[in-house]
Amino acid sequence: RQSKEIQTLAAAEGAEVPIAKERRAGYVWVAEARLPTTVESEEEESKRVKRYTWNPDDMKPLTSTLDKDSRCDVCGVACTEVLYEFRCYRRLKPGEPRPVG
């Protein structure tokens, strides 16, 4: 399943859209991770670097978006439970050099 928005984007941009159904396997997908709970001011929290994980037990649900737009970017269906923030990077083939940075 794929949202109409992603289908349109993939048709316009071609192979450069990682979330397009036929391209997803070429990328490694990670979700925003829960960070250890510490008492911080809002200013300190906003400066904190996000961390990402492969571990489903460490995934951090997006709570603020369910009030606004609860539609999944991947399938386009309204979410009734939990949404997550995902990032991806290109999957390397064996022997392929890692990108700098």
Image (spheres, grey):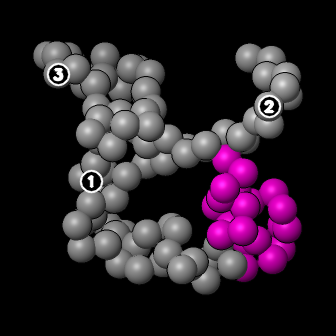
Query: Looking at the image, which residue is at 43% across and 69% down?
Result: 72
Q: Amino acid at mark 2?
A: Pro
Q: Residue at x 43, y 48 (%)?
A: 85
Spatial CA span between label 2 and label 3? 38 Å
The residue indicated by pointer 3 is 37
- Label 3 and label 1: CA atoms lie apart by 18 Å
25 or 77, nearer to the observer:
25
Quadrant in the rendering for residue 59: top left
50 drawn magenta:
no
Q: Which mark is residue 83?
A: none
Mark 3 or 1, which is nearer the eye? 3
The boundaries of the magenta stretch are: 8-27
Does 32 appear above or below 35? below
Residue beneath the point at 52% across and 68% down: 74
Judge whether 40 appears above or below 4 on screen: above
Of callouts 2 and 1, the N-terminal one: 1
Sequence-earlier tag: 3 or 1 = 3
Residue tagged by mark 2? 94
Would you identify the image quadrant in which residue 20 lies? bottom right
| Horizontal relation, residue 71 to residue 23: left or right | left
Q: Which residue is mark 1?
A: 64
